[in-house]
């Protein structure tokens, strides 16, 4: 487990350095209440109990969620629905969603 | 209740505060009260979010006529044999058990907006600080000559939650060999723009297997329809030669239907069917009309909050509202419910109100593992809900992608029904 977490952080750090985002931490400006409100849009499709068809995201690492949303926003990950949703999110909204979903129980 | 009994009820209620024959439903608390009429995609979501997010600070009552909600979404997949009927039915038990929503199974008969009270079929009244109406659609039976409430069993519309879709499935399964299935889709605006064409696909799917010489004729009051290129390419690919779609300009208009002879008369021709699905024009559920918040057939709303333009204490969600660019879909209703829930909490408990964000995606199944989708997100403009961005499946995408889209729709179905009922 520790190993996985460690690898995860290495991966994220590489990504951040690579994208030159270190100066602009992904979770800056996160607002929990805003995240709770915005999560409504995600919960039409994502649910906690199953990954069938659409992945469960509750309790995922905040940085992981933020990173994924940015990749969808930049259309570097495929899926029209996610590109659409993420495309309409600004940095504050992405950070807010990331910390909100991270706070939910898996 | 006639006038006399209503009057005697009022005097009786005034005379007796402790023993009421038809009590006003009340939890006896000083908490602000929200009443939600209609426990479908919009109403169940709104009730759940207001109760859940206010953490008990708001007293939420949900008035819903039926004990179980059978989703119209995925009812076409039931028709095609991809789902069993029970799998599209949902109970309201969790809304009360998990979130403290008072679920009352009754009809809301009328709204007194100046006294802020809703009268129920039982005669009881429920008072509100804010009222949410999400009653879905009523069918305009008189919009097609010859169609009527009685005609529904012969020519089912199966466009509202309930068992008509079972009748339709039986009729399709028992259709004579080489017979004709006729579909009359509704005119705009109507619930679920791609729905009639998904239904045609599902009927074709059954017929291909069980009755391959049968034909499908679509007599459309429109000249184009949602995801048209995708559906038509899908029909040609999976059911070649089976489906004939006739647009309004070609048939010249539907003059009448005859459920006895199973005929559909147009300017061009009279079509005789063995099985016919006739979906008339629609309007907002009657309670929205009664509440005085409609203009014509639907309720105009303020995009930022989903409050009606007519009465700031009354919100209308889903199919019954004029949501401009947003289609009348379960996804849209669910999305609008969250905007309204956030606004209502803000008004009643001073919680923070965030800018409205709406989205919708409609998945449709064309054949086994051939899913397509169309979606958009929206923002609240001054007057209208406006499109921000949109997408639609491509005609040339591969089979693997189509299968993935179908699987995604299963995820969505489970997601939205969890979001409404868990
Ligand atoms: C064949 C078909 C396929 C569809 N497929 C999809 C799909 O794939 N995706 C999608 O997003 N949408 C789909 N839809 C559309 C979707 O079903 C509707 O848009 C959605 O249900 C609208 O939600 P609503 O809350 O406005 O109304 P509804 O979900 O219809 O809910 C209204 C509820 O209010 C109750 N009610 C009404 N009046 C009263 C009253 N006076 N008192 C008490 N209770 C009352 C009714 O019993 C009902 O339960 C489909 C529809 C059809 C017909």
Image (cartoon, coloured by chain):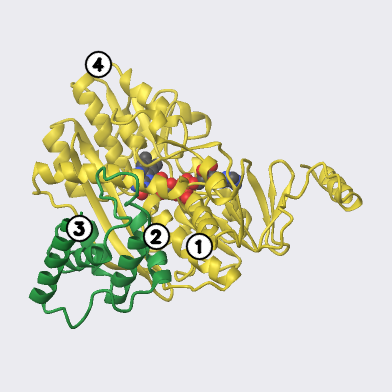
Q: Residue B183 versus residue B369: which sits nearer the camera?
A: B369
Give chain A's shade.
Answer: green
What separation in Å lies between label 2 and label 1 (alpha carbons)?
10 Å
Q: Which residue is mark 4?
A: B177
- Image side of residue B78 versus residue B281, left or right: left
Marks 4,2: beta carbons within 8 A: no
- The disc numbered 2 marks a residue on which chain? A
Q: Which residue is mark 3?
A: A2
Q: Which residue is mark 2?
A: A40
Coordinates of residue A76 in the picture (x, y in percent): 12, 64
Coordinates of residue B408 in the picture (x, y in percent): 24, 46
Q: Find out if the beta carbon at label 2 lies less than 8 Å from the nearest ligand 1 atom.
A: no
Q: Mark 3 and mark 2, same subunit?
A: yes
Coordinates of residue A99 in the picture (x, y in percent): 33, 67
- The disc numbered 3 marks a residue on which chain? A
- Image side of residue B416 versus residue B178, left or right: right
Q: Residue at x 51, y 52 (%)?
A: B43
Q: Mark 2 and mark 1, same subunit?
A: no
Q: Nearer the viewer, mark 4 or mark 1?
A: 1
**Residue B182 tag number:** none
What separation in Å lies between label 4 and label 1 (alpha carbons)?
52 Å
Give chain B's shade.
Answer: yellow
Marks 3,1: beta carbons within 8 A: no
């Amino acid at each position: 487990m520790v190993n996985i977490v460690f690898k995860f952080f290495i991966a994220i750090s590489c990504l951040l350095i690579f994208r030159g985002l270190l100066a602009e931490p992904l979770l800056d400006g996160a607002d929990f209440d805003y995240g709770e409100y915005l999560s409504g849009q995600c919960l039409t499709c994502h649910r906690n109990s199953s990954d069938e068809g659409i992945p469960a995201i509750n309790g995922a690492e905040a940085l992981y969620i933020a990173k994924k949303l940015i990749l969808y926003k930049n259309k570097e990950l495929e899926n029209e629905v996610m590109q659409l949703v993420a495309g309409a999110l600004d940095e504050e909204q992405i950070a807010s969603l990331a910390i909100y979903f991270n706070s939910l129980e898996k | 209740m006639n006038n006399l009994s209503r009057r005697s009820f009022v005097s009786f209620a005034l005379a007796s505060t402790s023993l009421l024959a038809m009590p006003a439903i009340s939890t006896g608390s000083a908490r602000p009260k929200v009443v939600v009429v209609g426990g479908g995609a919009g109403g169940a979501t709104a009730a759940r979010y207001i109760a859940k997010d206010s953490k008990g600070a708001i007293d939420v009552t949900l008035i819903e006529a039926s004990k179980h909600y059978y989703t119209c979404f995925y009812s076409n997949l039931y028709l095609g044999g991809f789902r069993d009927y029970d799998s599209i039915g949902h109970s309201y038990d969790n809304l009360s058990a998990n979130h403290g929503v008072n679920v009352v199974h009754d009809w809301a008969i009328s709204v007194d907006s100046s006294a802020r009270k809703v009268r129920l079929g039982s005669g009881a009244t429920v008072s509100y600080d804010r009222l949410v109406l999400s009653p879905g659609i009523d069918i305009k039976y008189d919009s097609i000559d010859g169609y009527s409430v009685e005609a529904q069993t012969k020519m089912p519309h199966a466009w509202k939650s309930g068992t008509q879709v079972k009748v339709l499935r039986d009729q399709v399964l028992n259709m004579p060999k080489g017979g004709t299935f006729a579909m009359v889709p509704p005119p705009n605006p109507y619930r679920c723009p791609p729905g009639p064409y998904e239904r045609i696909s599902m009927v074709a799917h059954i017929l291909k297997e069980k009755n391959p010489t049968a034909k499908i004729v679509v007599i459309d009051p429109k000249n184009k329809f949602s995801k048209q290129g995708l559906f038509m390419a899908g029909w040609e690919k999976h059911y070649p030669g089976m489906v004939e779609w006739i647009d309004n300009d070609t048939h010249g208009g539907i003059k009448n239907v005859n459920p006895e002879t199973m005929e559909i008369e147009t300017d061009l021709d009279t079509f005789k069917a063995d099985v016919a699905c006739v979906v008339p024009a629609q309007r907002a559920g009657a309670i929205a009309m009664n509440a005085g918040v409609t203009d014509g057939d639907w309720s105009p709303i303020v995009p930022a909050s989903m409050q009606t333009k007519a009465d700031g204490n009354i919100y209308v969600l889903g199919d019954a509202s004029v949501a401009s660019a947003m289609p009348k879909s379960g996804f849209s209703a669910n999305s609008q419910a969250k905007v309204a829930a956030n606004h209502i909490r803000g008004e009643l408990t001073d919680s923070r109100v965030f800018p409205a964000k709406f989205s919708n995606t409609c998945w449709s199944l064309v054949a086994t593992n051939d899913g397509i989708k169309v979606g958009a997100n929206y923002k609240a403009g001054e007057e209208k809900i406006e499109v921000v961005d949109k997408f639609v499946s491509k005609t040339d995408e591969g089979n693997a992608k189509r299968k993935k889209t179908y699987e995604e729709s299963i995820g969505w179905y489970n997601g939205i029904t969890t979001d409404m009922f868990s």
